[in-house]
Image (spheres, rainbow, N blue to C red):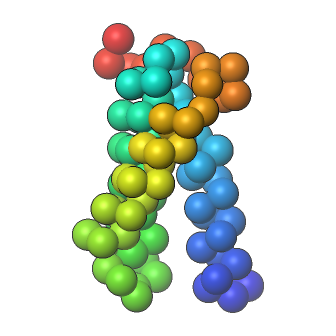
Amino acid sequence: MTMRIKLLALAAASLSLAACGSSPTDRTVSGAGIGAGTGAAIGAIFGGIGAIPGALIGGAVGGGTGLVTNQNDINLGEPVWH
């Protein structure tokens, strides 16, 4: 597998988990957290842009995904902070 395919597969997997929670705020916060962690891991493991820019990009993408989804798109239960 090329690095590009690995990154696309990891991005798709992380985006599928980015909408946890019952309110738009919950989904945005959890999506940003998951995205930041995934972006940092991708940046650190695969190199290129680095962990911090990867976390910033991943957090923005995950938070945006969480914001635009609704509760019925992906429902993994109540967030742990409730």
- Whether residue 37 is visible here, answered yes or no, is no
- Relative to residue 81, is residue 53 depicted above or below? below
Q: Answer left or right for 76 relative to 82.
A: right
- Whether residue 2 is visible here, answered yes or no, is yes
Q: Answer left or right for 42 relative to 73.
A: left
The N terminus - image quarter:
bottom right
Q: Answer left or right for 19 relative to 48.
A: right
Q: Measured from the top left, where is residue 74 in percent x and y?
A: 66, 28
Toward the front, the furthest residue is 68
The quadrant where residue 55 appears: bottom left
Q: Measured from the top left, where is residue 42 in percent x and y?
A: 45, 71
Q: Measured from the top left, where is residue 79 in percent x and y?
A: 43, 20
Q: Residue at x 36, y 44 (%)?
A: 33
The quadrant where residue 53 appears: bottom left
Front residue of this view, candidates 2 and 62: 62
Q: Residue at x 58, y 40 (%)?
A: 17
The C terminus - image quarter:
top left
Q: Measured from the top left, where is residue 28 in percent x and y?
A: 42, 34
